[in-house]
Amino acid sequence: MSLTSYCWYWQANNQCGLIHADSALQAKQLLSQHHIRYTKIKRLSGRQRKLYQPKLSLWSLLLQQTANLLASGLPLSEALRHSICETQSKGLRWLTEDCIRSIERGLSFSRALADYRGWLPEADINAIAWAEQNGQLTDALNQLHRFAERQQQLKKQLAKALRYPVIVLIVAMGVCLMMMGWVLPSFAQLFGEGELPRLTATLLNFSAFLRGQAVIIISIIVVASGIIFAIRNRAPLLWQHSLARLPMIGKLLQDSQLQQLFHRLAVALHAGIDARQALSSTQSSLNWLPHRLALQQVQQQLESGNGWVDSFRVSALNEPRTLSFLKVAEQSGKIDNAFSVLADFRQQRFEQNCERLIDLAEPLLMVVLGGIIGTLLVAMYLPLFSMGQQL
């Protein structure tokens, strides 16, 4: 069955929700089949639909609750209905209720979710579709939930590792600008036209240069920010390659993205998806373009008749550890287990590098911040010491 074209918002007394149909008439007919007498119905544009898009963390929680209820013996529609009893997200509740109505009309869960490809990861929908065919829906939902939990954990760890250095650097820059632009020149006026120590004179000259060229400096910063923004949006591949070359942070990003890639492949293959479809589904779910291109190369090699090891060897993912794990997995026929182990390894290395970055950044930033503020304070008080010696 082909996907419907439009999403409709409806209201009926104290109820409201979403429904997918090719026309307003069809939407009304579908609602009437569920004894819903609408009072208002309108078609939503793509931008309006995004306003109701639920958080992926809530989607992951829904998958876990649905899997637990399915394992207890409830049918899918009832499991979904119970899973959204306490949700506060309108978008998630409307999505689930629309899926329940579709399931009760005889559609599969993955087909109902396909109408929400703009909201949900396409790899999740594909994994659910293949799991339904193989009778492993509960297992697939649990796998998807574990994957989403891992991704949220990695994001939190990365934010924690970067938050402290960024805050300290912003505070240091703010203190420096305040002291160079206001405090230090104010102190200089107290000393008149006399000769100042070399450090104080150097900082005063630099302060005067900053104040005199403030407009030009601000313009350069604005232009540089615009260029960076343009590269990020119009040349994302170049932007991501540049991020990957950053010291420490580049390794964190690489490990995070590789963990996502390997885990997506493991979930897809474990759900019974064939290799070509698993690679295609994983590509569509990745935001890291270098890995997308690498997976395209792997897929082309597999379609040419090569094995997993030979396919990865000619791509940008040809790391020795990856190749050795895949070589053993090809012999045992457990490729999904190999990707799962590789994902675990990347996650462990990511966590270790995060801790190392935090341990290294704290003392280093304290030294930098203390050195900058200490230098400025010494430059301000050196003239006082000179005046005391003269008296």
Image: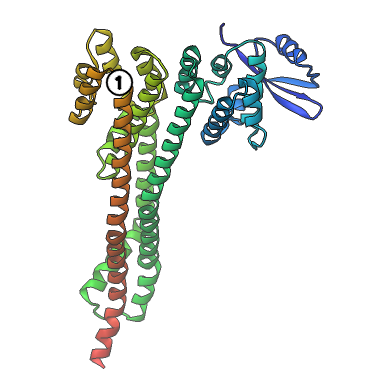
Q: Nearer the viewer, residue 362 or 154?
A: 154
Classify residue 152 by image quadrant.
top left
Classify residue 153 by image quadrant.
top left
Q: Is residue 175 above or below residue 78?
A: below
Please say whether residue 257 is visible from this viewpoint. Answer: yes
Is 168 on the left-hand or right-hand side of 129? left
Residue 25 percent coordinates (x, y): 73, 9
Q: Which residue is mark 1?
A: 334
Who's the residue at 64% across and 15% down the image? Answer: 102
Q: Nearer the viewer, residue 345 or 136?
A: 136
- The quarter of the image holding the N terminus is top right
Who's the residue at 23% across and 21% down the image? Answer: 312
Q: Nearer the viewer, residue 312 or 249?
A: 312
Q: Given the current orientation, which residue lies at the most extreme bottom position?
A: 391
Q: Secondary structure at mark 1?
A: loop
Please say whether residue 95 is visible from this viewpoint. Answer: no
Residue 255 percent coordinates (x, y): 30, 36
Residue 284 percent coordinates (x, y): 41, 21
Q: Amino acid at mark 1?
A: Lys
Classify residue 235 by image quadrant.
top left
Is 53 on the left-hand or right-hand side of 172? right
Is 53 on the left-hand or right-hand side of 202? right
Who's the residue at 30% across and 43% down the image? Answer: 249
Is 16 on the left-hand or right-hand side of 152? right
Say how the picture is coloured: rainbow
Residue 133 percent coordinates (x, y): 49, 12
